[in-house]
Image: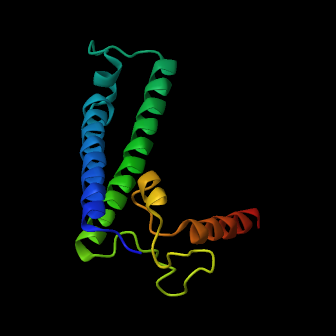
Amino acid sequence: MGLTKKDLKFFEDLLNEKKEKLLQELGNLEASTVGKNPLEQSGDLSGYAYHLADQAADAMDREHAFAMASRESRYLLYLNEALDRIQEGTFGMCKKCKKVPHTKNPDSPWITRQRLEAVPTATLCIWHKAESDATKQVKDKD
């Protein structure tokens, strides 16, 4: 059971809303942290050296901001890929169920609407995702 045109429009609007909000957050992050040099960021424009602990704290803040920007950029990629899937007509389809339907997924190859509402960038049904996570945990333990 696939998604209706109304469903696809709902998810397209949801994804575009998330994308717009994320782009705004990335812009704010760049303006407040990433786009400034260490002296501008600290607010010390006097030209005099400031305390080493202040420099370390500022460096840690910049590092945190870069990590957040990287994470948000990756999420932006996922949002764009989901929007592309809407255009291609494959949005809401589990990548693994297309090849080998999961025995627990009654709507195979489709991802449930509830899952898509929670994670609109999802590419796997909940059952394949659980198996993927379990496999990843086993590999991480090794």
20 and 118: which one is in front?
118
Q: Nearer the viewer, residue 50 or 138?
A: 138
Residue 55 placement, left or right of 23 = right
Residue 102 drawn at (x, y percent): 59, 80
The quadrant of the image that shows the C terminus is: bottom right
What residue is shown at x 74% (from left), y 67% (from top)?
Answer: 138
Visible residue check, residue 35: no
Q: Residue at x 39, y 69 (%)?
A: 92
Name the residue located 24 percent from the left edge and 32 percent from the top edge: 31
Viewport quadrant of the N terminus = bottom left
Residue 67 vertical position relative to residue 39 in the rendered view, above or below? below
Which residue is outermost to the bottom? 99
Residue most toward the right? Answer: 142
Q: Position of residue 3 (x, y in %)?
A: 34, 69
Q: Say above or below: 67 vs 35.
A: below
Task: Using the image, determine if residue 20 lies above or below residue 55.
Answer: below
Q: Is residue 13 left or right of residue 1?
A: left
Colour scheme of the rendered structure: rainbow
From the top left corner, tell me how far across and down residue 137 is, in percent. 70, 63
Q: How many marks?
A: 0
Would residue 116 be visible to someone looking at this image?
Answer: yes
**Relative side of 28 to 52, left or right:** left
**Residue at the (27%, 33%) spot, across then down:** 28
Quarter of the image for residue 10 reads: bottom left
Q: Position of residue 79 (x, y in %)?
A: 33, 58
State the residue in front, 127 or 114: 114
